[in-house]
Amino acid sequence: MDEDILKNGTNSTPKEYIASLDLGTNTCRLLIAEVTPNGPKVVDSFVKVVRLGDELATKGHISKEAARRALSALKICAEKLKAYPISQGRYIATATCRQASNRQAFLDVIRSQTGIQLEVISPAEEARLAILACADLLDSSTKYAIAFDIGGGSTEVMWMELFSQKYPEIIECISLPLGVVTVAEMTRFNKTPLTSLQKIRKLVAKEAKSFSDKAHIYPQMRKNNVQLIGTSGTVTTISAIHMKLDRYDRTRVSGQLLTPEMINKTISSLFSMSVEERLIHPCIGPMRSELVLGGMAIFQGIYDVFPINPVRVADRGLREGILLDLISHEK
């Protein structure tokens, strides 16, 4: 018997830790997990709204204030990462860093001041990681699925084939340069914001219809052979408000099914709320109050084209997808 086991009474095999970081247009998110036989077990996390893309839609760059907010958040992430012997990690940036004119200067500052080397991923890779995160919520009732991820600076829509013994396979995907932050910036000073949001809805629907035609989705929809899943904060907000939660609880929200009646009633109630009511709502709050209507307009555009009943809700994101991807590469 191993001498260390005799001394400690437990197996002395060192724990293995992996990490994922997602710097999005709105939020910086970190997960640190222990690798276990049952998959990743989260041991530390960090979430901070940084609004990295606050001037992306209007000026095409990362503002100085946004860069400062992101740097402050990433310094905290760097300290957390130093506290664990990380064997593998992947630290990504998405839409804002893909599009901003000053992205390289920003990335250089982050690397020099935090030691974190951010990887700017493509829309296709963003879609793949999102699907990895929510694949276990899809069921075997259909052969195909549509997934959408409404982010801060872009929206991905994926058309997938489902399999019983492996992850879904993306057949086609589209990335729209519209997200909750960019839409909020586009409509901030508009005298008729609801009219602007209706234009966003129609624009998204037009793009979704072109995508559907290209991917030949409608024939499968007519056969009821398609399910729909949303991985964004927009659909989780709809679910939480419909459930009348006193505070947001991801364990209760993730996996929920939304019918058209639930969706329409909840979105109508959101549009009828005052700014103050959205600010104090326990499932919206000050960090999302000015973003939530833009997210609803994007979702409505998608749902106008893909009115599948029900919509499955996934409170999962790129961080979870990265962790699962890291583990799968180890095997």
Image: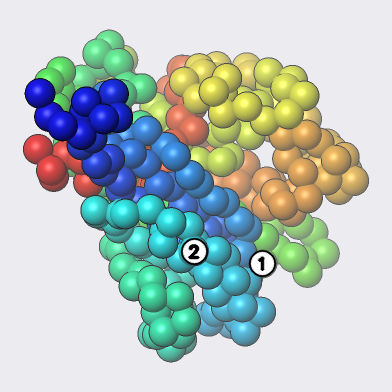
Relative to the observer, which residue lies in front, 266 or 70? 70
Q: Quadrant of residue 13?
A: top left
**Left or right placement of residue 165 versus residue 187 in this view:** left
Q: Is residue 113 visible?
A: yes
Task: Provide the secondary structure element on which disc 2 rests.
Answer: helix
* Disc ID at residue 295: none
**Left or right of 169: which side holds 104?**
right
Q: Position of residue 93 (x, y in %)?
A: 40, 65
Q: Secondary structure at mark 1?
A: helix
Does residue 105 sit above or below 149 in this rendering? below
The residue indicated by pointer 1 is: 185
Question: Which of the pair 311/119 is nearer the observer?
Answer: 119
Labels 2 & 1 near each other (Cβ < 8 A):
no
Q: Residue at x 74, y 20 (%)?
A: 244
Residue at screen point 39% across, 75% down: 115
CA distance separating discs 2 and 1: 32 Å
Quadrant where the image shows the N terminus = top left
Q: Position of residue 28 (x, y in %)?
A: 52, 58
Which label sits on residue 79?
A: 2
Disc 1 marks which amino acid?
Glu
Give the residue drawn at x 53%, y 81%: 61
Q: Is residue 178 visible?
A: no
Q: Identify residue type, mark 2.
A: Glu
Frontmost of labels 2 and 1 is 2
Q: Residues within 10 Å of mark 2 (few under 14, many from 20)?
A: few
User: Compared with residue 97, is residue 248 higher up or lower down, i.e. above or below?
Assistant: above
